[in-house]
Amino acid sequence: MSHFTVVVVGDDYEEQLAPYHEFECTGRDDEYVIDVDRTEETRREYEEQTSAVCKHKETGEIVSRYDERFYRLPNAQLYPSVVVENFRTKRFFKDIQKYRSCRSSLSR
């Protein structure tokens, strides 16, 4: 959501501002909304991308490095875990919907 202060000159301010509305906020799907299909790009990322994750040395449990238990960078002296690089994203996210959800929340 964006907030801008603008000056609109003329009587029909709604028509003049229509090209600048944000679909996510207004829900209006009109001639100014461009649908962008990123399904294949997202699917390729899901299949091929790797993520740095934390793996417990003893139990093998794999968790996100952003897990709430790590309020700072994981440290082997504080936590019995190590950072594992190049872990396949699709092995960490069990399905593409969870990946999409996480990916979209991080991009906000």
Image: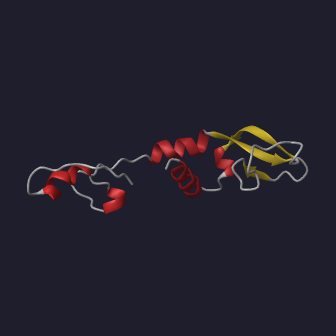
Camera-side residue: 62 or 19? 19
Q: Is residue 93 left or right of residue 44?
A: right
Identify the residue shown where x is 27% and y is 61%.
28
Q: Position of residue 80 (x, y in %)?
A: 88, 48
Instruction: List the single residue furthest toward the left.
Output: 11
Identify the residue shown where x is 79% and y is 44%.
74
Q: Position of residue 78 (x, y in %)?
A: 87, 47
Instruction: List the single residue furthest toward the bottom.
Output: 27
**Colour convention:** secondary structure
The mark total stands at: 0
Whether 49 is drawn above or below 4: the answer is above
Q: Position of residue 73 (x, y in %)?
A: 75, 43
- Rendering quarter of residue 13: bottom left
Q: Position of residue 44 (x, y in %)?
A: 53, 41
Instruction: List the single residue furthest toward the top.
Output: 86
Q: Is residue 79 left or right of residue 22?
A: right
Identify the residue shown where x is 25% and y is 50%.
20
Identify the residue shown where x is 12% and y is 49%.
9
Q: Is residue 57 left or right of residue 23?
A: right
Image quadrant containing the N terminus: bottom left
Q: Is residue 75 left or right of residue 7?
A: right
